[in-house]
Image (cartoon, rainbow, N blue to C red):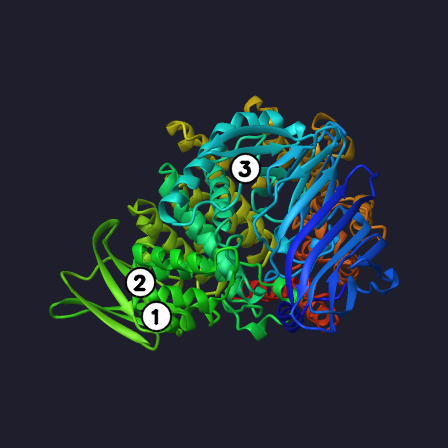
């Protein structure tokens, strides 16, 4: 497949105006391919023009341009040439058989092992429209879409516009014509979906899942629809432009690569958001954030769309920011900014400190083609970009920010826009130098560092706030006596200001917190007395965002080898049982178990000691949660106990506990840990898969079987992952890879021969299977337990080879994380 370059897209946009796509899909042809006929009407602005349309078919049957047949043999690397075009209107019709996907790209086909029913959905983002239909596949060639689908009679069909059965044609559906949208937003879902439908604000709303998840959707339908209605109403309170499409469907689909996709009128979401087991309030809140995020895209991305992929922040940073803010406004029981601070923001900080960091809004030349654009869907474009917008709102104020947003939408509705267009709107609304702000915040990479130096003065005390970086900051200094908040000092720090002194009266504070309230994006440090105080009073600090700032500072100090990992664990042991915010408990435990216990401690004995400490913490957390009847914290405690168990006995006790042993997800977690410890056998795993015969059971079994410390089990898992037959779906590949590598000392020698084999094997699967599997091969299948110089040497050698772009990017990230872990270990 040829990669579309920015220069090619610019030239084609200058040449063409695309009017309509008429797409006819026949989904009744079999299990391997479906029929796709595309008729696209477009005009050229000059005579004797040459261009191309993209298509990646299984078989191209026929292509006719203005009634004349084109040679199918000219289709090369996914491009069908259109040559010698006269100025004026044209009509192109392309008929092809298209391949079904099992990697979440193009038209994904899934057969549910629970009941044998089949479901389809399209995923056209970012370059995969040509796997479904013939397309001038770039975001600034918008057109209207008329989609017709033939499906088995018992199926439901969903699309961007309201889908209705065609009278007299069983199994035939027609979707209402869309307004002008980009090619990557065209969407179809088809199958025997279970649906819950309602109407709100005069529009049909629907939520849809496969039949085997119907009971779980039904039990949560009121919550999902309630959040959907609430955020829909909030968007209409703050935005002048009404919702721009004719319906709002949310299809929770299987084996989805992303969290969700913002197709106009038909949002697709991963069906893990339909909970079949106990979940925490943070998980429910995160589902709400995703709902609000995708609805934000109806304006930020769908109504007004980026011109080229250098501006993905105009989509993702805005949807991220608005998703959190609108959910906080619309659903008062949720506190999403706390979860953002402790989880999403850490994702951004980590990405921003790797060699692959990039500006939130790169220069156009920094994204020369679609392959490079794919790489920027990361913690920078989402979390850092949202943090930058939060800082912009702090600077401009809510009303001014929204005035600029509404101006932007009014000027570019159903069109395309750039960073410059948005900044112009903000400058008009505010009268301020937003262009300078944007250069400092959006065109630069890496986090700033803010650190205090506190001293006593004759009048009281003073702090010198040092600033490493190039961005202006509006932030707060929190002043505390023990855990009691004394005062807040507002600071405005200039972009080129290396330090600023702030003076205050009274005695020197016990605790000074830079960026209290988490309004800006920067690494922060605590001075030594403040850190000493924080270790005593952290869980008693009154504001959860204050506590997240302290926890993030501690996390960052561990990663920078400035704080011993053991000190972080001891702080967690001391404070998490009394921590009231579920999101903080989960975030801290995730870092403690995932990074500290499994990567940052230099010896096996140190790892065991850490797991024992975390197990003790879980017991304390569970006892307190039972006293307060806090079901979410009880669940977190149980999950932590399972994850950190070092012997079989507590796991068997959990499995026998009626409250735990009846929960399918917890049962798989227990069995997975038993497998890693060598305390179960294949027969028990197979029996559990029969007990839980659906997709999650299939994934759980794959993960557990791969985790068994047996030569035959490892060989079978390796063959399934990397055999050229490529039989695993994207989800089964990830589950198998997760199970394969285990940090248990008893597994390391069994796994060691595979470390060297991993790097060429990952290159092979990435080359054969494309972007989604390249990412999975780099992230899930990387040999994380081998935090050793030898692994680093192999990784660095692999990166000198010619690798697919997605694999190279993710391997670079994993290699840098390995390098960092080695530094932390060397100083522990």
* Mark 2 in CB contact with mark 1 (< 8 angstroms): yes
For residue 56, above or below residue 720: below
Using the rendered view, name the quadrant where residue 495 is placed.
Answer: bottom left
Q: Is residue 494 left or right of residue 506?
A: right
Q: CA distance from mark 2 to mark 1?
A: 10 Å
Q: Residue at x 24, y 51 (%)?
A: 482
The image position of residue 152, as x and y in percent, is: 76, 31
Of marks 1 and 3, the one in the foreground: 1
Mark carried by residue 472: 1
The image position of residue 546, as x and y in percent, is: 33, 52
**Label 2 environment density (alpha carbons within 10 Å; few <14, some 14–19, many ≥20):** some
**Mark earlier in primary sequence (3, 2):** 2
* Mark 1 in CB contact with mark 3 (< 8 angstroms): no
Name the residue tied to disc 3: 639
Q: Residue at x 60, y 29 (%)?
A: 195
Q: Choose between 514 and 757: the one closer to the eye.
A: 514
Residue 668 appears anywhere in the view: yes
Instruction: Tell me the element at label 1.
Output: loop
Q: Choose between 394 and 782: the one closer to the eye.
A: 394
Q: Choose between 309 and 650: the one closer to the eye.
A: 309
For residue 4, above or below residue 91: below
Q: Quadrant of the N terminus?
A: bottom right
Instruction: Tell me the element at label 3.
Output: helix
Using the rendered view, name the quadrant where residue 236 is placed.
Answer: top left
Of marks 2 and 1, the one in the foreground: 2
Q: Choose between 475 and 167: the one closer to the eye.
A: 167
Name the residue tied to disc 2: 395
């Amino acid at each position: 497949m040829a990669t579309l370059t920015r220069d090619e897209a610019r030239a084609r946009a200058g040449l063409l105006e695309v009017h309509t796509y008429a797409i006819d899909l026949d989904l009744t042809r079999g299990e391997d391919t479906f029929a796709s006929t595309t008729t696209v009407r477009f005009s050229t602005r000059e005579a004797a023009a040459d261009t191309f349309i993209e298509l990646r078919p299984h078989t191209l049957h026929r292509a006719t341009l203005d009634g004349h047949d084109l040679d199918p043999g000219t289709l090369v690397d996914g491009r069908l040439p259109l040559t010698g075009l006269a100025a004026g209107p044209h009509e192109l019709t392309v008929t092809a058989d298209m391949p079904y996907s099992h990697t979440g790209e193009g038209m994904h086909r899934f057969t549910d092992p629970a009941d044998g029913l089949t479901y389809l959905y399209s995923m056209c983002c970012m370059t995969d429209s040509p796997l479904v239909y013939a397309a001038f596949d770039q975001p600034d060639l918008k057109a209207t879409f008329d989609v017709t689908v033939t499906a088995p009679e018992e199926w439901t069909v969903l699309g961007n516009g309201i889908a209705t059965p065609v009278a007299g044609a069983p199994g035939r559906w027609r979707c209402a014509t869309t307004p002008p949208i980009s090619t990557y937003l065209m969407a179809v879902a088809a199958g025997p979906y279970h649906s819950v439908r309602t109407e709100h604000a005069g529009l049909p709303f629907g939520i849809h899942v496969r039949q085997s998840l119907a009971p779980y959707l039904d039990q949560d339908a009121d919550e999902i629809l309630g959040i959907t209605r609430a955020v829909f109403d909030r968007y209409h309170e703050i935005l002048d432009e009404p919702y721009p499409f004719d319906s709002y469907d949310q299809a929770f689909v299987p084996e989805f690569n992303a969290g969700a996709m913002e197709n106009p009128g038909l949002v697709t979401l991963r069906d893990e958001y339909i909970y079949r087991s106990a979940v925490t309030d943070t998980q429910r809140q995160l589902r709400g954030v995703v709902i609000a995020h995708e609805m934000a895209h109806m304006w930020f991305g769908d109504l007004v769309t980026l011109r080229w992929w250098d501006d993905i922040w105009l989509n993702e940073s805005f949807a991220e920011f608005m998703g959190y803010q609108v959910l906080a406004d619309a659903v008062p029981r949720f506190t999403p900014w706390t979860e953002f601070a402790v989880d999403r923001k850490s994702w951004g900080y980590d990405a921003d400190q790797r060699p692959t960091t990039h500006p939130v809004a790169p220069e156009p030349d920094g994204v020369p083609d679609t392959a490079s654009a794919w790489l920027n869907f990361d913690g920078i474009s989402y979390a850092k970009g949202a943090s930058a917008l939060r800082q912009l709102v702090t600077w401009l104020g809510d009303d001014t920010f929204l005035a600029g947003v509404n101006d932007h939408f009014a000027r570019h509705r159903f069109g395309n826009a750039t960073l410059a267009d948005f900044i112009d709107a903000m400058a008009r609304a505010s009268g301020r130098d937003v262009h300078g702000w944007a250069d400092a915040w959006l065109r630069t990479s890496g986090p700033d560092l803010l650190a205090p130096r506190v001293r006593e003065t004759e009048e009281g005390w003073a702090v010198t706030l040092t600033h490493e970086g190039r961005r202006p900051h509006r932030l707060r200094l929190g002043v505390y006596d023990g855990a009691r908040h004394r005062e807040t000092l507002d600071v405005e720090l200039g972009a080129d200001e290396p330090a600023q002194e702030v003076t205050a009266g009274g005695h020197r504070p016990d605790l000074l917190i830079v960026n209290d309230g988490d309004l800006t994006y920067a690494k922060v440090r605590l001075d030594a007395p403040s850190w000493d105080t924080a270790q005593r009073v952290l869980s008693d600090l009154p504001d959860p965002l204050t506590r997240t700032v302290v926890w993030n500072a501690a996390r960052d100090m561990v990663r920078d080898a400035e704080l011993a990992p053991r000190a972080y664990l001891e702080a967690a042991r001391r404070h998490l049982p009394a921590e009231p915010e579920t999101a903080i408990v989960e975030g801290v435990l995730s870092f403690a178990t995932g990074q500290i216990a499994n990567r940052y401690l230099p010896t096996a004995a140190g790892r065991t000691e850490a797991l024992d400490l975390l197990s003790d913490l879980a017991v304390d957390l569970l006892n307190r949660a039972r006293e307060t009847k806090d079901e979410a914290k009880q669940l977190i405690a149980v999950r932590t106990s399972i994850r950190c168990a070092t012997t079989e006995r507590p796991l068997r006790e959990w499995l026998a506990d009626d409250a735990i042993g009846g929960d399918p997800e917890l049962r798989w977690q227990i069995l997975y840990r038993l497998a890693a410890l060598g305390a179960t056998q294949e027969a028990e795993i197979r029996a559990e898969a029969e007990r839980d015969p659906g997709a999650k059971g299939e994934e759980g079994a794959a993960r557990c079987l791969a985790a068994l410390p047996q030569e035959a089990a490892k060989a079978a898992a390796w063959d399934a992952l990397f055999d050229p037959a490529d039989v695993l779906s994207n989800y089964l590949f990830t589950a198998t890879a997760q199970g394969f590598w285990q940090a248990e000392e008893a597994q390391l020698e069994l796994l060691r021969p595979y470390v060297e084999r991993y790097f060429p094997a990952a290159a092979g699967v990435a080359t054969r299977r494309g972007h989604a599997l390249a990412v999975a091969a780099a992230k899930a299948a990387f040999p994380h337990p081998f935090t050793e110089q030898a692994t680093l040497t192999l990784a660095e050698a692999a990166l000198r080879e010619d690798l697919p772009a997605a694999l190279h990017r993710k391997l670079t990230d994993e290699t840098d994380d390995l390098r960092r872990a080695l530094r932390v270990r060397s100083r522990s």
